[in-house]
Image: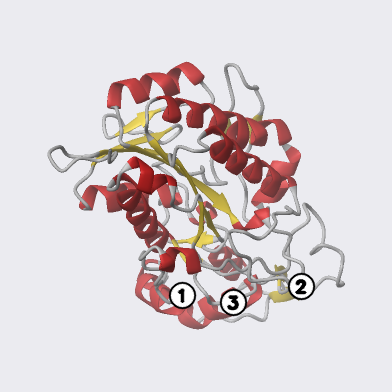
Amino acid sequence: MALGTKDHQPTVLITGATGLLGRQVFSVFSNAGWRTVGTGFSRAKPPSIHKLDLTDPSAVEKILEEESPNAVVHCTLPPSHIYRISHSFTHTLLPPTGAAERFPDKVAQNPDAARALNTNATQHLASLCKSRSILLLYLSTDYVFPGRRGEAPYHPSSTPDPPNLYGRTKLDGERAVLETTSGTGLGVVLRVPVLYGAVDEAVGNKESAVNVLLDSIWAAQEEGKEIKIDDWSVRYPTNTEDVARVMCDVVKKWTGIGEQERKGLPQVLQFSANEAMTKYRICEVLAEIMGLETKGLVRDQPVEGDGGGAGASRPYDTKLDSQVLRDLGIEDRYMGFEAWWRWQVKAYRK
């Protein structure tokens, strides 16, 4: 039996719907005709976005009972949020990530909070979805791979070996979903790289590790100011609108077929843009669009083998291969980085 029906409007529940990616996912599903229910925490806006602590098992179970979704899209919360961990898991806070801090570093400083969100809460959600025959699409990261020079591109079947705690907790979340839903076709993982897109004005550019580079560029305009920017790690910045489209296409495909056919589909998918850039190169592109100078930006090129400098170890190149999506008939097209920013730049001109 298909999880969605032609006679009734299908329902999707989106966790993290107030975040950088979650907002786009909410919009895409709504525009596709789904009854779309979102959850958030610090920025929840009832009745469209319900306030939900994902680490509260009873609260998660309650919303699934009340909304009866055909699918749950489990979007991770953005690094700018304060992660309030409560109830049966832990009581640790993850502070907001500032412009000079990387999310893997914050996770390394708060391992219990990271495990509670990425692993424990995901395990519980997967169990609830399985018992109710609800499809669960789990968002993961390219940081499940080590990113050693010469290894990329990575395929869904490539062996994960996370370089830091952030990647390990996300991999644990993947395994929780896949093991809990094994043999049912109800659990799917989608790995994506670093994301950029339209930010919440109340939060600002720190919602994205890409957008926040705009703040660094502006700060570097100050006379005598020098800001180090990574020019070592190769990234593939991908727009949230593209990821949201792919997530919607995946859910529509999985919920539109019968149980036996669904069981035969791959459980791990990957999507990425293909424009390779270091953060320094990203700054060069953004500065050129903005008409700003880059003389205050200093290339940070650490000695080979030191893991990319201080803080949590980071990979050199974790390019994701998207062939499995194409094999499924799901488009992996993406918008060009420079083209999107030239369209968006009017919001940043001063």
Q: Position of residue 275 (x, y in %)?
A: 53, 77
Q: Amino acid at mark 2?
A: Arg
Left or right of 235 on screen, residue 329 = left
Q: Do tag 2 and tag 3 residues touch (Cβ < 8 Å)?
A: no
In the image, residue 326 sits, relative to residue 77, either above or below, namely below
**Which of pointers 1 and 3 lies earlier in the amino acid sequence?**
3
Q: Amino acid at mark 1?
A: Phe
Residue that numbered label 3 is attached to: 276
Left or right of 190 on screen, residue 105 = right
> Element type at marker 3?
loop
Q: Quick one: quadrant of the N terminus?
A: top left
Nearest the eye: 233 or 287: 233
Left or right of 44 on screen, residue 228 = right
Residue that numbered label 1 is attached to: 337
Nearest the eye: 122 or 303: 122
> Can the viewer see residue 3 in this picture?
yes
**Which of pointers 1 and 2 lies earlier in the amino acid sequence?**
2
Q: Position of residue 326 (x, y in %)?
A: 42, 68
Nearest to the eye among marks 1 and 3: give it. 3
Mark 3, Cα crowd under 10 Å, few <14 / some 14-19 / many 20+, is some
Residue that numbered label 2 is attached to: 149
